[in-house]
Image: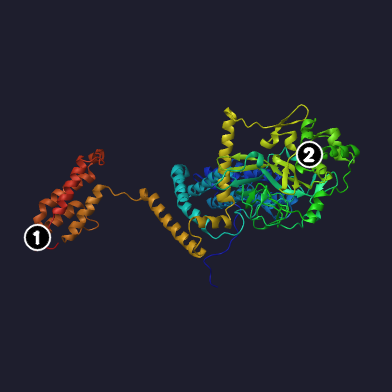
Amino acid sequence: MPSFPFRWRRKSRTDHPVLIESTPGGLRLLFISISLLALTALPHFNHIRLEVMLIFLGLVSYRGLAARYRWLPRNRWIVYVFAAIGFTVAAWFYGPPIGRDPGVAFLVIMLGLKSVEITSRRDVGIVVLLGLFTVMTHFLYADGVNWTLPLLALVIALFWLLAQMEHATPRVFMISDIKLVGKMLLQALPVVIILFYLFPRLSGSLYLFQGTTSSGVTGLGESLKMGTISNLIESEDVAFTASFFDQPPPPASERYWRGNNFWITDGREWTRGGHGTHLIAKDRGQIRQNRYRYEIELEPNNQNWLFSLDYPLEAPDQAWLQGDYHLVSKQPVKKKIRYQLDAVSFTGADQLTEQEMRLALSLGRTQITPRLETLIRSFTEGTSSSVMVANRVLQYFNQNNFIYSLSPPILASQAPVDEFMFDSQKGFCGHYASSFATIMRYAGIPARVVVGYLGGDYNPRSNQIVVRQSDAHAWTEIWQQDRGWIRVDPTAAVAPERIEGSIDISSLGSDGRVLFDSNNLIGFKRLYIETIWIKDAIKAKWNRWFINFDSGRQKELLKSLGLDKFEFKYVFMLAFLVAISLLSLLSAWLFRSEREKIDPVSKIISRFDNKMRKLGVARNPNEGPRDFQLRASKALPHLENQLAEITDTLVFLRYNPEVENMQPGNHGSSKDSQLALIKSKINQLKAKQNPRSA
């Protein structure tokens, strides 16, 4: 029978692969890779469960200890045991690995398992690639510029580790590899920038897999009860930011950000009601005075209504504007969105429909006690002017012992407005807006309650207003026949500081009275605020041109570059060609210093060889300078002396050690003079009319 040259045989138990820690420089390479691997996963401490992170750290630590202490078992069953424990824990807390958090948790477990399996440099390369993928997952949670720089440094470190793997002794090449990685990133940067900004983009932001919110986070819901808004004051979370185009924002006293209008009341709670959602929008195109054009970036709130400055003129895309200036989104806001608006500071003399008039005067089941009725009659006595009645109510708030407080007493009676006006006299903006609107309606004046935000921190460095949850506010609007809806804020009568400043959540008065931040910026406070402004301005630019750079932003960019008139495929082809050209130019510039440098002596020798080849005598590859001189002198006897002089000088410059002490860079040195003289003599070499061939 024929015999085969190879046979399968079972690997002996004594056959062990050479571990990476046993190779030259391998132990250092292993610990660097493990350390970088841990750094890629550690930022997820804030995102995934502690049990998962502890399993990952245990796996990484075990591989490091196994390299240090050779007696620890490193069989494959160890990996199986760790895998069973890790995946069981992840599945117990997260269920199937579907979604952002479960997917990241399982990825971290697998990253730890792979670190235990590191036995060769190939495994280190795989771990580095997994580390790069893990770095990308951090942007599913945080997209701010604060995280970008540390993660970029981590990416550079991972690429540097890949470069280190190519050397037998990685320690020697540390600095050169860092330079190599830097050059690679610089080469890729033009292509990345051009493709990022000009490649066709899908609608939506860069991070398509960001988590969505499942509940409202603004605190402004579909109804208003007395005291509910005060729960938001302790939150410094950002509700939205507003950027203004080529104009300053309105003054602080005019920064009323409308959210929702409440028409229906039962005396304790205000709601929009089913009727209010069917109001017909009116034509507001004729209003042009005190007009503001701005852009809002709204944080997730799980609501269908948007915020606007005072009275918007038209609805943005994916939304509609109702007749009471209420902006409604077609979908709940479950991720950060951006929209542009034009708004004015007054409505104009609109006409109320019969339905609107009925809603604006209805008191529902509100109980009006005799003493409250007597008080309201005192407000309306001797006047029919709605403005006069409103001023009397505001004066009553101002001249009596009313307190603007975050912790008012609970209104437990069946007539909460009566109890607030006569007994507690202590409340938040919701108390004053609800009570004022109830009094206006009983007096026969159409009124409604508006909830939203007031004020916001203006950043002059970015011309942007940052509105936080602590700026939540409620106010009232009353109807006047010849002027339309007029904003009346009862808070101004009790706490006028609230209109110009924000609430200081760090302290309260001894009686529970709200304190307000001072606008007097001096000393360290001024320096601190300037730092915050610069930070927010950088963040605003980052969000505008990177995080929220979607198809709309891309169209704006193309329009500013004058490329919006061309078909997008031609724009992309042009961008690609420009990127390749820039890449080629940058590569030539970065690596020009890496080209082999030919010293002046070698250039002269090459010049001499070319000249002799033209004269009919070519140097053989294995021929020395003296042998070539003798052979050339026989072939060209009339040049014997010149050839001898040129050869002697070249041999001296090439092989004499004293030449190394010369300064070839200085003009006029002996070496440069001799090179110039030799160059001149080589140019003077000429053949006779009938030279003998070699």
Q: Which residue is drawn at 79% across and 48% down?
A: 446
In the displayed structure image, the side of residue 435 where residue 148 appears, left or right: left
The residue that disc 2 covers is 432
Nearest the eye: 628 or 394: 394
Nearest the eye: 170 or 394: 394
Residue 308 in percent (x, y) is at 67, 49
Q: How crowded is mark 2: few (under 14 residues within 10 Å), some or many (20 or more)?
A: many
For badge 1, the amino acid type reads Lys
For badge 2, the amino acid type reads Tyr
Q: Residue at x 42, y 57 (%)?
A: 581
Residue 315 in percent (x, y) is at 66, 55
In the displayed structure image, the side of residue 580 where residue 338 appears, left or right: right
Can residue 368 be seen in the rendering of this structure?
yes
Q: Which colour scheme is used?
A: rainbow
The residue that disc 1 covers is 688
Nearest the eye: 100 or 638: 100
